[in-house]
Image: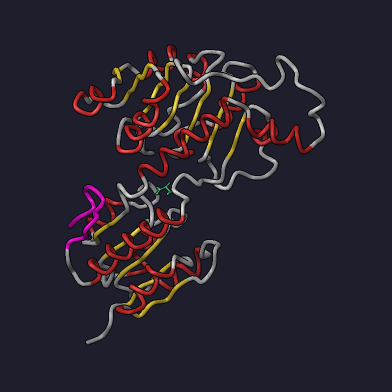
Amino acid sequence: MDRPRVVVTRDIPAPAFRKIWACCETRYWDSQEPIPRDIFLEWVQGVDGIYCLLTERIDPEVLDAAGPSLKVVSTMSVGYDHIDVEACVRRGVQVGHTPGVLTETTAELALALLLATARRLPEAIHAVKAGEWTTWKPMWLTGWDLHGATVGIVGLGRIGSAFARLLQGFQCRLLYTGPRPKPSVADPLGATYATFEALLEQSDFVSVHCPLTPETARLFDAAAFRRMKETAIFINTARGGVVDHQALYQALVAGQIAGAGLDVTDPEPLPSDHPLLGLPNCVVLPHIGSATVATRTRMALMAAENLLAGVAGHPLPHPVQGGTV
Ligand code: DGY
């Protein structure tokens, strides 16, 4: 019997690659950089499965190019805003992702970024290297305390609630917002539901953990930043598309908020001459929320399991909600 044909769009961790290679005719883009769109469109023709990353847009053009043989799209990410799930389902293509495995790792990064931004670590490190550390100065590089602060969590899902758990040691007051209150998750964490507006007005730190959907796109616009405290720190480890970056830039420059820590931006990568990168009170990381050796390896394996189940015509072990057919 013919082995299933699959495309893998990047150089992925070896254990995952070996699993796929053992069972499938595999064409893979052996690079750390994304596969060019035209090559991708050519390679997907007649395949049974696509193993992609969040850098590949999976839309009707890709599905048309792949044709009726395509059974599964498996992304090595928990987020799937780059995949037109409805279009996949309409064509009988299953969609898989990697939920759960990166929850704690991403929550840890959110906390690290929050502390780095609040305590101005990049500025401090730069000052030492630049020879600006002349002596101990009373108010030099002073930042903002996390302990005792009010932290507003936008999206109390898996990662948002793991982040709330990490904050338990800091005696914070926790607020959260989302489409509806979630008492069974929030009560044990001591988190209180607030409207989006009330959360913005009351929080010293606002941390974003919601998915990018039509409802959350550009949720953080000029009006949202105007509502926040002048001393507030804004943290985004979810998706860049949730934020209007021009409005964020204006808010930082005008002193409407005190600082921002971003692990995700729109676009990604942020061009090196982007105005946000020139601001000392904006800390930007290159989308490394899930970037530990163990977590990225587990994500790659989960995505391989989805791919292999899908090409065999089985239900996926980790399907996107609504992405099963
Ligand atoms: C995801 O998986 O969606 C993250 O953004 C990258 O790990």
Q: In what quadrant of the picture does the N terminus appear?
A: bottom left
Query: Which residue is most to the front?
Result: 136
Left or right: 186, with 61 as reference point:
left
Using the image as rendered, state which of residue 247 and residue 159 is in the foreground. 159
Question: Which color scheme did the rendering employ for the protein?
Answer: secondary structure
Looking at this rendering, what residue extends furthest in the bottom direction? Answer: 1
Q: Is residue 80 visible?
A: no
Answer with left or right where residue 245 lies relative to residue 177.
right
Residue at x 80%, y 23% (from the top left corner):
135
In the image, residue 76 above or below residue 164:
below
Q: Position of residue 179 (x, y in %)?
A: 27, 26
Q: Residue visible at 51% across and 30% down?
A: 114
Rendering coords of residue 49 (x, y %): 31, 69
Looking at the image, which is closer to me, 118 or 95? 118
Q: Quadrant of the C terminus?
A: bottom left
* Image coords of residue 147 (percent x, y): 47, 19
Left or right of residue 60, residue 315 in this image: left
Is residue 323 rendered magenta in the image? Answer: yes
Task: Give the total of numbered labels.
Answer: 0
- Taking the spot 39% from the left edge, 71% from the top edge, the residue there is 17
Residue 152 among magenta residues: no
Q: Is residue 195 above or below residue 47?
A: above
Quadrant of residue 149 within the rendered picture: top left
Q: Which residues are magenta?
A: 315-325
Q: Is residue 250 left or right of residue 304?
A: right
Main secondary structure of the magenta stretch:
loop
Query: Is any atom of residue 209 visible in this view?
Result: yes
Q: Is residue 99 above or below residue 115?
A: below
Which residue is located at x 47 percent, y 65 percent?
10
